[in-house]
Image: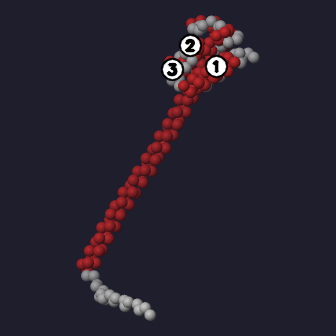
Amino acid sequence: MIQKAPKKESPKRAAKKPTVDELLAVIAKYEAKFEEIDSFLRFVGIERDELRVKSRQLADAKEAYESAKAEVNALRDSIAGAKDSLFQLLEPGVMEFMPLFDKMEPADPEKHGESADQWRRDPISALRLSAHAAGLLIDADVIVIGQLQDRVLDKPQDWWESIDGLTASVAAAIADKLNDFIYDDGGRK
């Protein structure tokens, strides 16, 4: 039969009672810790109050920004609409009223497409471009479709780089609208 080893008996320690000074020292440590915790809590409270104020200021500033942005966009749309209306008013004979804008090659059916002589003098508003795109072209003195076509034919890859504010993606959209317009024979099909 296997016998178990006898357990070692640990000497019983007599419970030592802390002295008053030791208890006061422990209490002082806890009070110091609580003071540190309280200090952090006060700091967090102050920061939260400041965060609320700054968040309100941010919301107010964002609202003012959005309002100003909407006003700027409304003004741009108004200007673009006025330009578009002007060109529609002059559409029957733009070149009769503004011969100075006749800065384009004469229509050549082989180079410019069939019936080019009929639609090359149409204002760019006939392409139904966005107000932004039309505004950029008008600012660059591209008033009629023939002027735009000439620019595209002269420099097919980078015709748009000489026009301030025009990006490659907007230029691609303009070129697509121009091609669609020409394919549809200037809307006369």
User: Between disc 3 and disc 2, whose residue precedes?
Assistant: 2
Q: Is residue 50 above or below residue 29?
A: above
Q: Position of residue 145 (x, y in %)?
A: 62, 15
Q: Quadrant of the C terminus?
A: top right
Select label 3 or label 2 by which is in front.
Answer: 2
Secondary structure of the residue carrying numbered label 2: helix
In the rendered structure, find residue 154 and report the number of the disc placed on it: 2
Q: Quadrant of residue 100?
A: top right
In the rendered structure, find residue 65 and report the number of the disc placed on it: none
In the rendered structure, find residue 178 and report the number of the disc placed on it: 1
**Amino acid type, mark 2:** Asp
| Foreground of the two, 44 or 164 | 164
Secondary structure of the residue carrying numbered label 1: helix
Q: Position of residue 106 (x, y in %)?
A: 62, 6
Q: Is residue 26 above or below residue 141?
A: below
Q: CA distance from mark 3 to mark 1?
A: 17 Å
Q: Quadrant of residue 18?
A: bottom left
Select label 2 or label 1 by which is in front.
Answer: 2
Would residue 143 be visible to someone looking at this image?
no
**Amino acid type, mark 3:** Glu
Q: Position of residue 73 (x, y in %)?
A: 55, 29
Q: Quadrant of the N terminus?
A: bottom left
**Amino acid type, mark 1:** Leu
Decide: few, some or many residues near mark 2? Use Cα within 10 Å; few <14, some 14-19, many ≥20: few
Q: Is residue 41 above or below residue 63?
A: below
Q: Which residue is mark 3?
A: 161
